[in-house]
Image: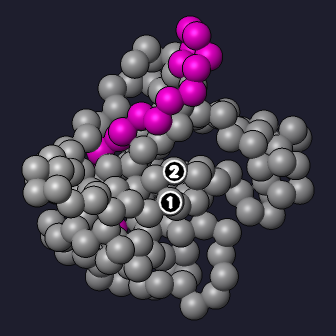
Amino acid sequence: MSGRDVFHGNAGSRDRLIAEGPIVAARLRPGRALAELARMRGLDLPYVDVNLLIDTGASTSFVERHVVEALGIASIRRQVVTLADHKSVECLVYRATIDFPLQDADDHSPKMMPVGITIAATPNSTHELPHHGLLGRDFLSHFTMVYAGSSGRFDLHVSGALPRDR
């Protein structure tokens, strides 16, 4: 991974980017250790395809509870998270892997990069949203974001070592 790899986001239009925000389509799955155990036992590894909103105002990344329930992974701790409505809720926190689509800056080939992520599980939404959770500053600290609102695009440039798939 060169420090020049990039994720290119395209909302399709300026209006959609304004309405929905910058959203990343990715795959969330159990980490490498659980994946190796599942393979040794001949089991299929669960995963969930997710849309995650980039939220520079969120300190913590999170997904709705049903996402981690579908993965069948164990929590590692509890954490109080303040939601956008300023309500604080106690959430279970999990270690997982996000397969994140990056483009190689040298040969422009797309690839899925496994990135270790610590993610909180919030209560399931009671209304339809265009995303399943948020990528907060804990995840975004490994990237430089370029937001080109007038063209409906945004880029995430890798700016340091990405957390390992655990």
Residue 73 image-quadrant placement: bottom left
Q: Residue 120's x, y, as percent?
A: 33, 68
Measured Cα–Cα span from mark 2 to mark 1 = 6 Å
In the figure, is residue 114 to the left or right of 78?
Answer: right
Find residue 17 and name its label. Answer: none
Write the residue at 28% across / 58% down: 45
Find out whether residue 77 is within the magenta segment: no
Where, quadrant-wise, is the N terminus in this rendering? Answer: top left
* Residue 109 painted magenta: yes
Q: Are marks 2 and 1 in contact (CB under 8 Å)?
A: yes
The answer to which of marks 2 and 1 sits earlier in the sequence is: 2
Residue at coordinates 35% horizontally, 74% vertically from top-left? 70
Could you say where residue 107 lies in the image, as x and y percent from the top left? 58, 10
Q: Which mark is residue 49?
A: 1
Magenta residues (range): 104-120
| Quadrant position of residue 93 | bottom left
Tell me, yes or no, if residue 25 can be seen here: yes
Type of the residue with mark 2: Ala
The image's mark for residue 26 is 2
Q: Is residue 66 above or below residue 136?
A: below
Give the mark count: 2
Name the spot of residue 69 as percent of width and height, x first.
Answer: 32, 77
- Position of 82 relative to 29 (above/below): below
Residue at 34% across, 32% down: 162
Q: Could you say which is closer to the camera, residue 19 or residue 85?
A: 19
In the image, what residue occupies the spot 10% across and 50% down? Answer: 40
